[in-house]
Image (tube, grey):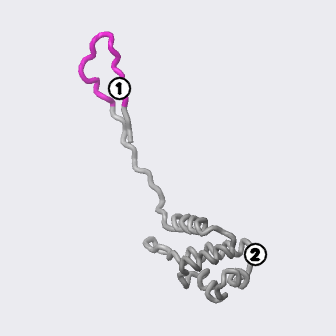
């Protein structure tokens, strides 16, 4: 994948659905039958060739015994991992000494507190 290319949502959704199905040791036919969709359609969804409606996603999630919200959380995790840039820390500026300011009166402390964001 090129640096400026982002994965399609349907591709990642399909990959996560397939991962769950395979982790459960189930066939396309079993899950498709339980979700009331054709084997061909579910196969195309898993390969990222079809973008399923929310109703189809919910039916497939029910067939896989996973929550739709969990599917979407996994999709988000995969998307973030696929497009997250490498974090680079900005150089930190050196801390400069604080000028003493006006002369202090005898008996008073001259503490200074620096806050950084």
Residue 7 spot, x, y in % from top left: 50, 74
Q: Is residue 48 above or below residue 100?
A: below
Tell me, yes or no, whether the highlighted magenta stretch contains residue 100. Answer: yes
Quadrant into which the C terminus falls: top left
Which residue is located at x 35 percent, y 16 percent?
109
Magenta part of the chain: 97-113
Horizontal side, residue 100 vs residue 75: left or right: left
For label 2, the SS is: loop
Farthest residue, direction right: 25
Mark earlier in primary sequence (2, 1): 2
In the figure, residue 70 lies in which quadrant?
bottom right
Please state which of the two labelled residues, at mark 2 or mark 1, is closer to the viewer. 2
Report the front residue among 21 and 61.
Answer: 61
The quadrant holding residue 93 is top left
Q: Is residue 93 above or below residue 46?
A: above
User: Label for residue 53?
Assistant: none
At x 60% / y 75%, what residue is drawn? 58
Q: Position of residue 104 (x, y in %)?
A: 27, 16
Residue 90 or 68: which is nearer the viewer?
A: 68
Q: How far, Cα to Cα, is label 2 from label 1?
A: 65 Å
Q: Is residue 50 above or below residue 114?
A: below
Residue that label 2 marks: 25
Where residue 2 appears, as percent x and y from the top left, is: 47, 74
Identify the secondary structure beneath mark 1.
loop
In the rendering, which numbered label is found on residue 112? 1
- Image spot of residue 66 (x, y percent): 66, 69
Graded by Cα atoms within 10 Å as few (under 14), some (14 to 19) or many (20 or more), the crowding at tag 2 reads few
Using a 10 Å C-alpha cutoff, classify the residue at mark 1 as few (fewer than 14 neighbours), some (14 to 19) or many (20 or more). few
């Amino acid at each position: 994948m090129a640096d400026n290319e982002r994965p399609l949502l349907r591709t990642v959704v399909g990959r996560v659905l397939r991962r769950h199905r395979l982790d459960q040791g189930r066939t396309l036919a079993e899950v498709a039958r339980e979700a009331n969709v054709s084997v061909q359609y579910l196969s195309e969804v898993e390969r990222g060739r079809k973008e399923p409606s929310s109703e189809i996603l919910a039916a497939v999630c029910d067939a896989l015994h996973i929550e739709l919200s969990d599917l979407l959380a996994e999709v988000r995790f995969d998307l973030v991992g696929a497009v997250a840039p490498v974090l680079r820390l900005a150089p930190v500026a050196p801390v400069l000494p604080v000028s003493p300011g006006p002369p202090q009166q005898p008996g008073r402390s001259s503490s200074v507190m620096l806050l950084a964001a």
